[in-house]
Each structure stands twice: as structure tokens, then as C-alpha cells.
Image: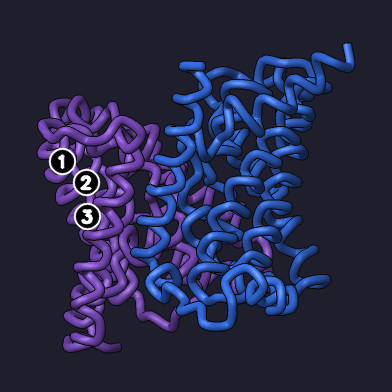
Amino acid sequence: MSNSYLQEAWKGVGRENPVLRLVLGLCPILGVSAYLVNGLGMGIAVTVVLICSNLVISLVRGYISHKYRLAVFLIVVATFVTAVDMVMNVYQPDLREALGVFLPLMAVNCVVLTRAEVFASNQPVGRSIMDGLGMGIGFTVALLLLSGIREILGTGSITAVNAVLVEDIFGTNYEPIRMLEEPFGAFIALGLLLALVNAFSRKQNLA
Amino acid sequence: MEQLVSIIFIYILIDNFVLQRFFGVCPLLHNSRKIESAMGMSMAMILVMTLATPISWLIHNHVMEPLGIGYLQIVVFVLIIISIGQFIERFLRKNNPNLMQGLGNYWPLVTPNCAVLAAALLVADKNFSFLESIIFGFAAALGFSLALLIVSGIRDRLEVCQVPAPFQGVAITLISIGILSFAFTGFAGMFAL
């Protein structure tokens, strides 16, 4: 039993990764990936919202009429996004400032809404929570990958950690790829990352 | 007047919603396979954003601010956007069924959409007048449509190209969008508010 719950969570990280495999929710992925800290903050926020909204939608799934389900999903998600927004405003005001408009935009995030529609609205509560957790972690992993690439290669340092680590890898003469900090750099970096993931999964399928 | 022209050009070319701000990348990727579907999506977006943005402005400035309920912003804006979507859908079904038939497929994608909500949230932050907020919504939607049409044109060409296997599909499209976005940075600084 517990094994199948773990599988439910694990699929979101690997096989059905919302960003790298299903290509959903790219708006926050591209928008907040300039720095690792922002990426981590956004990832945690999305995970919390996913778990909570999956939980509530799974609980009320018997009472929603099919016709108005989208409106119900949107209101539930928007409520939790507002809550996360308020909590972050109090405890992490700098992070909230850095995420800007992308945090409220989570209310219409494709990942959250798709999970509500295809999973939480017809599955039991326990599974829905695990699904939310897995999808949230998968989203966070993808966001950390992209923001890691962009921050480390683009600025040659990590703001949250000492710059020593990066200097160890590249040496002190490393010339940062400034392009990765720009919006167009984000598009290109994500395209290359997706191609890399495709190449890896292809190899695994062939083997 | 000058201000209005500036707003139009800034949000179509310089501060393009998709290419510089990343709002609405999902519909851009999932609706750009054919020119016709890109056209339908653009029409729907222009219709919804031009209406939803000024209405959000009105409600934010004249209802929520005086009552001090600014913290309900997200929920209220989401509600406004779905109701406007429903309203336009019903209205068109009755008065212009032909147009609605064309738009119908894109409707569920438009109403809960990143770009529409982003326009509503941004207009609440800025000190725009009512007229400016209409123009802002319209220009942002035009910018989105421009990007969508260009990308669908690029994808049309990519169909006949021999793309390396791992890059096929979304990966090469994202890289093309990146190059397009790079080209658009050339407009930076042409207009200022």
C-alpha cells in the first residue's frame, strides 16, 4: 500500500515530470529562474499550493457539478495562492519582492489546474496528496536545474552560497555567459535542457 | 495622446508579454502548430484582454481600494476573468454563432490564462487612467498575437526541416522563440512612458 503511494509521488519527479516531460507551467519556470534562491522559493510555493488544492478538490470531488468544475478549481487554487502570498510577505519579504507578479500568477498555473482536472477530481484523498507532492517536487527539480544553469553559468557565482564553490569548478578566470541572464537566454537554456532530457530518455528506452 | 501611442508600442514591441515577460508561454507553445489555430487564439485573446483589463482596473480602483480589500486581488481577478469569458461566450453564441464556432475551441484555454491575469495584476499596480488601461490591455493582447503568429510561421517552416531527434517538438520551438526574443530586444529604448 505504502509502496503504491510512493510510486504516485515518484511519477511526478521522473516519468511524468510536469515541466521536463509534459511541458506545462513554463511561465513561472522561465520567469523566476534567473537566481537559484528565487527558483527554490517558487518551487516550494508551487508544491504547497499543489498539495493543498489537490487535497481540497479531492475532498469535494463528489459535490462539484461537471459544468462549473473549472470555476471551483480556480477559486480553490486562488485562495491557497493568496494564503501563500500573505505568509511569504510576512516571513520572506525579499523573496516575495523578487518573485513579483509570478507568485499571484500561480493561480492560473497550468500544472496546478491540470492536476486538479485529471487527477484530484477523480481520485481518493491520499493519492491526490501524494500526486501533489510528487508533481510539486518534480516542478521544483526542473526549476532548480534551469535556475542553477542560468545563475552559475550566467553570473559565475551563486548569491546564496559563497562564490568559492563556483571558483573551484571553473577557476577564477571564468568569463560568465551574460546572455543567460536575459529573457531570451532563458528560452534558449530551457530549450537546450529539454533537448538534453529527451536525449537521455531516448538512450534509456533504447537500452 | 502621446502617452497612449507609447503604451501601444511599448507593449507590442519592447515589453512584449510573451517574449520579454514570459506571460502566456503555454498557449504559445500549444496553439502555434497551425496558422489558423494561431489566428483563432489571437482573436479570442484580444477580445478577452481588451475587456478584462479595464474592468479589473475599475474594480480594483473603485471597489477594492476604497473598501480596503486589496488582499483579495487574486481571487477577485480570477473571478472577473472567468465571468467575462462566460459572458462573451454567451453573447457571441446568440449574436454571432459563426464567429463563436471558430473561437469555441480556444475558449477554455483563454479564460484561465497567464497573460490575461498578468495584465489585470499589472494594471492594478500601475497609475494608469481608465483609457490607458483599455489601451494597455489591447496592446498587450496585440503583442501576444504578434508573437503567436510569428512563432506559428516559424513552426510551419520547422516542419520541413531536418531537426536532430532530441530537439524535435518543444525544444527547437523554445530555442526559436529565444532567438525571436533576442531580435525583439533590438527595440529596447525606442519608446518610454
Of residues A161 and A170, the one nearer the viewer is A170
Q: What residue type is labelled 3?
A: Ala
Q: In which quarter of the image is residue A42?
A: bottom right
- Numbered label attached to residue B39: 1
Q: In this view, does B159 lie to the left or right of A170?
A: left
Residue at image position (23%, 28%) is B94
Side of A104 relative to B165 (left or right): right
Sort mark 3 into few (<14), some (14-19) or many (20+) by Cα contacts within 10 Å. many
* Pointer 2 residue: B42
Task: Please identify the quarter of the rendering in which residue B21 is found.
Answer: bottom left
Q: Position of residue B122 (x, y in %)?
A: 46, 69
Tell me residue A158's x, y (percent): 65, 73
Q: Which chain carries label 1?
A: B
What residue appears at the point 80 percent right and 63 percent down from the top-left corner?
A87
Which chain: purple? B
Secondary structure beneath dot 1 equals helix
Q: Residue furthest right?
A: A2
Q: Please report contact status of discs 3 and 1: CB closer than 8 Å, yes or no.
A: no
Asked if residue A134 shows in the view, the reply is yes
Nearer the observer, A119 or A197: A197
Give the alpha-carbon distance from disc 3 to disc 1, as whole Å: 11 Å
Dot 3 or dot 1: first in sequence order is 1
Q: Which chain is blue?
A: A
Residues marked 2 and 3, same chain: yes
Q: Do the residues labelled 2 and 1 touch (CB within 8 Å)?
A: yes
List the residue tagged with mark 3: B147
Disc 3 on helix, strand or loop?
Answer: helix
Q: Where is residue B43 in the image (x, y as percent from the top left)?
A: 20, 45
